[in-house]
Each structure stands twice: as C-alpha cells, then as structure tokens.
Image (tube, rainbow, N blue to C red):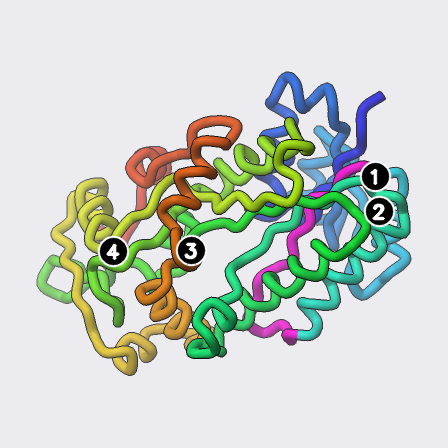
Amino acid sequence: MSKILAVFGATGQQGSSVVNFVLNDPELSREYKIRAITRDPDSEKAKQLKEKVEVVRGEWTDRASIEAALTGVHTVFLITTFSPVNDYEWQYSTSTTTADIAVEKGVKYIIFSTLANVKKISGGKYTKVGPFDVKAEAEDYIRGLPIRSAFVNLGSFMENFAQQPFVSPRPVGDGTWVLERHTSAKTQFPLIDAVGDTGKFVGAILADPDKYEGQTFHAAAALYSLGEITATIAKHTGKTITFKQVSAEAWAQTVPWATEVFVEGFSFVEEYGYFGPGSEELVAWAVKNARGKPTTFEEYLEAHPLKLAGSE
C-alpha cells in the first residue's frame, strides 16, 4: 500500500516541483500517494492538480483543517510562504504548530524547507533578515521533536530574475543594461531552478529517508558570481550588460519591498556565503546526492528566455 506524502504549498514553486517529480519518478510514484495541501482548493492551479492527485484544504488559521489534512499521512513536505509582511511569530508558529500536529497524527517523517540563520552565523551583525532566521529557528524546533526529519535549504531562485525585476538588469537609456548591487562582482549566489529542480533534492530524501535523516540539502546547481550571472544573462539575451557596484543606500532605493531584508541579506552573502561558511562544499554535496542532475543557469535561460525591462 502506498504511503501518503502530504505536500504543503502544492500549487507554489517548491510544492509543485515535489508533486511533479514524484509523479514522474517510476519508483517514488509507486511508493508514495500524494496529498496536495493548499489554502484554496478551488483555485485554478488546485483544480488542475485535482486531475492528478488528491487535493485538500489546509489553512494555518484553521487548525482543524491541518489536522484533517495530516490524518493518515506518512511523510510531510512542509514549507511556509516567504512574505515580508508576515509577522515573525506568525511564521514561526505556522511551522512549529504544523510540525506538532504531524507528531500528534502519527506522521513518520518531515521534510522541511529551511533557510540559513543569518543572525546566528553573522554573530548578530545582520539582524534584519527575519524571513531566513525564522525558518532556521523552526528547523531547530523540528529537530527536537520525536519525529524523523530532513531538510532542504534552497538557493536563490533562477525564477527571480523574471519575477522580481529589481534584481534583474535595468536599461541605462543608451541601448545597454546594467546589473547593480551594493556587493562586489565576486559575490557568489547559489542558483536553483526552483520549479524544475526542488523535487530532485526532496526526491533523494524520499527515496532513501534513512540515509538522509537529519541531513540538509543545500540545494542549488552551483555557485555563480554576480559577474558570471551578468555575463550569462548578456549571452542569452544578446544584450550589452555590465555589472556595477553601488552604495548600499543607492541600491536600497531600487528595492520596492523588504528593503532591509535584501540589503542586509546580500551583504551577509558577500561576507559569509549564502549558506554560511563552506557554501561551495555544501552545494557540491547536494548536487552529488540529488536524484537527477540540477539545471544550470545557462540551461534555465535557454528553456526560459529572460525578457529584460526596456527590451523590444
């Protein structure tokens, strides 16, 4: 009999990646039956999911809905939505309460989507990157529960260059573009095709939960410097793009939301590494152990051409 895999955020980038990967993996599709959990089962994306898997409502403000969604479940993929408007305590409580309910319902395994503890790694230097810190603290809580667990810590999404224009090159006005940051061109970011590849890392855990219990997949295809990112985007768009380092104050003016999160977060990456010390080794281990080859940034741009602001 198949084990039920409950996937939170099943209509989002990470959750949908896990759902599609399991459905298309010959071994995992036999071992697991997917229960997609979403806040709105009547959304267009949820309706499309219903054609492939079981879809149930799970709303964090409604404990009974979470309890019902986790009844009979063997493994949970748990993600809480990143949103700068969410209260820190709210984000923490949604993660920890859901994990508590999983334990109460007899769930055997939690796979939690976490992030680096920026405040802790930086020794208190960077304190404004709450969306990262809160997930790290929730991870610590889950590790202390009487349930088996493993973790995925995703790098910067390749999708962001299209979905968040302020991190993408902007037109200068003379037919060229510039990618601006307040960090140097050597600053390295781990990039991941979130929709295409999250499932490859989670799938590795699902395929061998004993091996990866307690482990964290620092999920990315590779580390790319801002200079390399600039050159790659230029190559695939056919545009003239240069990298320019500006002051933190100047770059902050271009960030429309969660300004302190991005400014301090990027400063942290330059000084400590996205995942903290040893980021390169952590990514190499994750790539080696992934259930499938992660998509490179070059391959991603070939499959998903980036349209720059100001382009015809």
Q: CA distance from mark 4 to mark 1?
A: 42 Å
Q: Which residue is mark 4?
A: 226
Q: Earlier in the sequence, mark 2 or mark 3?
A: 2
Q: CA distance from mark 2 to mark 1?
A: 8 Å
Q: Earlier in the sequence, mark 4 or mark 1?
A: 1
Crowdedness near tag 3: few (<14), some (14–19) or many (≥20) residues, C-alpha within 10 Å: few
Q: Is residue 139 left or right of residue 158?
A: right
Residue 44 shows up from this direction: no
Secondary structure beneath label 1: loop
Crowdedness near tag 1: few (<14), some (14–19) or many (≥20) residues, C-alpha within 10 Å: many
Residues tagged 2 and 1 counted as in contact (Cβ below 8 A): yes
- What segment carries the magenta color? 74-88
Of residue 249 and residue 170, the one placed in the foreground of this image is 249
Q: Which residue is mark 2?
A: 69
Residue 265 image label: none
Q: Which residue is mark 1?
A: 73
Of residue 129 and residue 303, the one placed in the foreground of this image is 129
What amino acid does circle 2 point to? Answer: Ala
Residue 22 position by quadrant: top right
At a point 66% along the width and 40% down the height, the residue shown is 213
Q: Which residue is mark 3?
A: 163
Residue at the farthest bottom position: 249
Of residue 256 and residue 25, the one placed in the foreground of this image is 25
